[in-house]
Amino acid sequence: MADPTVAPLLVAGGTVLDADGSRRADVRIGGDGRIAEVGPDLDADGAQVLDATGCLVAPGLVDLHTHLRQPGKEEAETIETGSRCAALGGYTAVVAMPNTTPTMDSAAVIREVQELGRAALCAVVPSGAITVGRAGEQLSPMAELAELGVTIFTDDGTGVQDDRLMRRALEYASGLGVTLAQHCEVTSLSEGSCMHEGEWSSRLGLPGQPAEAEELMVMRDIALARLTGARVHLQHLSTAGSVALVRAAKAEGLPVTAEATTHHFTLTDACVASYDPVFKVHPPLRTDADVAAVRSGLADGTIDAIATDHAPHTTEEKERPFDAAPPGMLGLETALALALTELTGPDADPRLDVAEVLALLSWRPAAIAGIDDRHGGPVVPGRPANLCVVDADATWTVDRERTASRSRNTPYAGRTLRGRVRHTIYEGTPTVIDGDATR
């Protein structure tokens, strides 16, 4: 909840960009944490002024796929440190994945995450596990968790393998009005793999996961969405075949949405040639053709959202041999800049405009998460002031030692990117001012 005693703010000199379009306007935020006025050349009138000259003022970003590790693996990340990463990246809300220890499959754990989230620098929206312990054998108490406000359920990290159980989960979810998000992977095809199966896995002598391990489950869940009428959200699509399947499902009018991560449209399996475990992710980095298909899916609306799959791991864990290291990489602080650099630049193919990138990072994921009443909405009076101010032309170099995360596993260290968050405002309070977190 917004603090009613916070000082009023004026975001001055920027260009407001939201789903309604672009216009030159200042934004006044009241002490109730809501937008009070939007218009050109507003008077400060005693408010704290945040300079947005030359910047875009947009709805805060929303991540559908964040691993905050707490409870259970606080040595890699906590809700506090992860939310600081999020704020620095322009996020005002993140959906926390349930593969914590213990799993987020009970009211007690959901309440714990919600309570810890009250002190975070962004909204922490807990997802619930589809099955108890993410073991794929017994449905979690979805109705009880939905009563606590859980809108998305997923066994992320493990796809639900049992077809009948997944059908039951979808039928149950349909009655509750919640969304099931699926990590699409048939384990009988992927077991023992540590990268994409193809030319590079053969060269490197590493066991590979075929694209079909993902595509078969995408195909199954689309069929189950058709059967049950339930909403299905497909997580971190990584193959050309998966994109084609979702495109056909949408043409059919099925209630299917999808996300892609930044690393699946910026990196390929050729990166694994270094044997550096920082490039080990789940699903694995794929081929140039797959990257091109994911980019096309983002451009034509097949893929609804860009997610980070922010997955921190300690240095000790990530320095294991490639086949033994855990999969995952950091993403919250670099996602916006990667998307602007890779998707809007002169060499991008296809090329998106900045508004399309912000839609993929803000208002579309907010709608999928069911939080668009608070995040991602238009910048208009009366709305909660969850905003980010972005200098789309600023360049900066990724430094793994300067991340706010407790972990350091970014594959983009030393890379120069375009686009940087100048300010982030969460519920009317600045969490980032001039590129620095306020706490």
Image: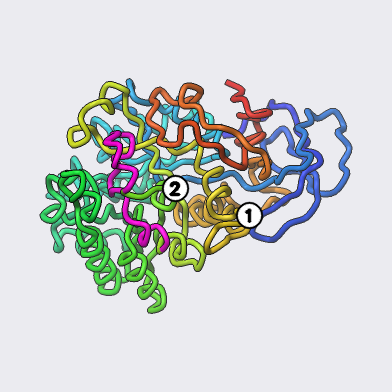
Does the segment drawn in magenta span residue 429? Answer: no
Answer with left or right where residue 72 lies relative to residue 413. Answer: left
Crowd rating for badge 1 (residues with CA inside 10 Å; few <14, some 14–19, many 20+): some
Crowd rating for badge 2 (residues with CA inside 10 Å; few <14, some 14–19, many 20+): many
x and y percent of residue 234 in the render? Answer: 34, 58
What amino acid does circle 1 point to? Val
Q: Nearer the viewer, residue 121 or 82?
A: 82
Above or below, comparing residue 404 to residue 63 in the picture: above
Circle number at residue 228:
none
Above or below, comparing residue 303 to residue 88 in the picture: below
x and y percent of residue 311 in the render? Answer: 35, 36
> Regarding mark 2 in the picture, which secondary structure is present there?
loop
Above or below, comparing residue 32 to residue 215 in the picture: above
Answer with left or right where residue 148 lies relative to residue 47. Answer: left
Residue placed farthest to the front in the image?
Answer: 203
**Would you name the residue on which mark 2 appears?**
262
Q: Quadrant of residue 172?
A: bottom left
Q: Quadrant of residue 275?
A: top left
Which quadrant does the N terminus fall into? top right
Residue at x 26%, y 62% (from the top left corner): 170
**Would you name the residue on which mark 1 appears?**
354
Confirm whether residue 422 shows in the render. yes
Q: Which residues are magenta?
A: 270-292
Residue at x 21%, y 62% (from the top left corner): 212
State how many labels appear.
2
What amino acid does circle 2 point to? Thr
Residue at x 44%, y 30% (from the top left corner): 82
x and y percent of residue 63 in the render? Answer: 46, 45
